[in-house]
Image: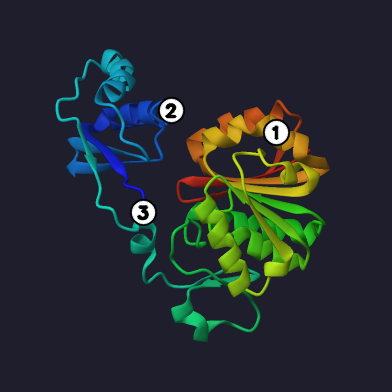
Amino acid sequence: MTPVWKVFFTTPIALSEIFADSLRDAISPECQALATAEVEEHVTWSVEAYYEFEPDLSAIKAVIEAPTSQTGFTVSDLTIETLPDINWVARSLEGLSPIQTDRFFVYGTHDADKIPAARLPLLVDAGEAFGTGHHGTTLGCLKLIEQECRRHVPRNALDLGCGTGLLAIALAKLTRRAVTASDIDPIATRVTRENARANGVHPLITALTATGFGHPELGSRGPYDLIVANILAKPLAHLAPAVEQHLAPHGTLILSGILHEQEQMVTSAYRDQGLFLEQRLRLDDWVSLRLRG
């Protein structure tokens, strides 16, 4: 496993989101995840940012310089530490109970005896890649996939940023048609292939390792009448022109990994490409979007 680096500091309660936003929006160093939490009731909150590579202390100080100037508050307890080299994904997902949607039943091996007859079973165990259906972003995508397939069964679908391959597997089971899956992480594409085989849909799923659409086969297999992308808001906005180029005329996009306050940034990026919001589904702090060209 790759070590995870954590940046930590505390602020007054009213300022935590201002400082958190500065880390979230920074291009370099790029934050992979961010959390704020109460430390002292009604007084102090913590800000925690997580990075794939060790961030430079001076770079972090430069990022929080703007909110420091804006608020007049100076961070005095900034720390950077590496977290233990363990599989955080598997640790965090151990023991999760199965979930159901209208059409799907998402479960781990330990719940194989609970599969209801009226649902399509999706077997995904905790492992090395994200996406088991328990997070609001993945669950939102599953629900929007169900609704889209009631309206129109896609002939050629792409799961962009596939993680465990859960969404690609769901599409393959629901449509019984070929699905392309891609991810920037080769571990994710390997896990997707393994999960596709475990779910009996490996002949239908092609998993490719690529940054964005940077694989020739992604282009040759398009255009796609459905693209599902459950990643993060900034990469989604950045990918808007490429997504539009690979989407079939009048095709559908399902996007997630978007905090509700980031929705306008994402929808604006796609509106500029002639793709417009049709449906919004909010689960907890996250929104999943369905757009159409």
- Residue of label 1: 242
> Mark 3 or 2 closer to N-term?
3
Which quarter of the figure is the C terminus placed in?
A: top right
Up the image or down, 179 lies above or below 270; here it is below
SS at mark 2 in the image: helix
Residue nearer the viewer, 37 or 165: 165
Q: Which amino acid does the dot numbered 1 rest on?
A: Ala
Residue nearer the viewer, 4 or 110: 4
SS at mark 3 in the image: loop
Q: CA distance from mark 1 to mark 2?
A: 22 Å
Image marks 3 and 2: residues in contact by CB distance under 8 Å: no
- The residue at 65%/59% (across/down) is 168
- Residue of label 2: 25
| Residue furthest right as drawn | 249
Residue 26: image location, x then y, percent: 41, 26
> Mark 3 or 1 closer to N-term?
3
- Residue of label 3: 1
| Position of residue 138 in the picture relative to residue 273 (left or right) | left
Q: CA distance from mark 3 to mark 1?
A: 31 Å
Q: Which amino acid does the dot numbered 2 rest on?
A: Asp
Residue 270 seen in the current view? no
Label 3 CA crowd tier, 10 Å (few <14, some 14–19, many 20+): few
Residue 134: image location, x then y, percent: 47, 61
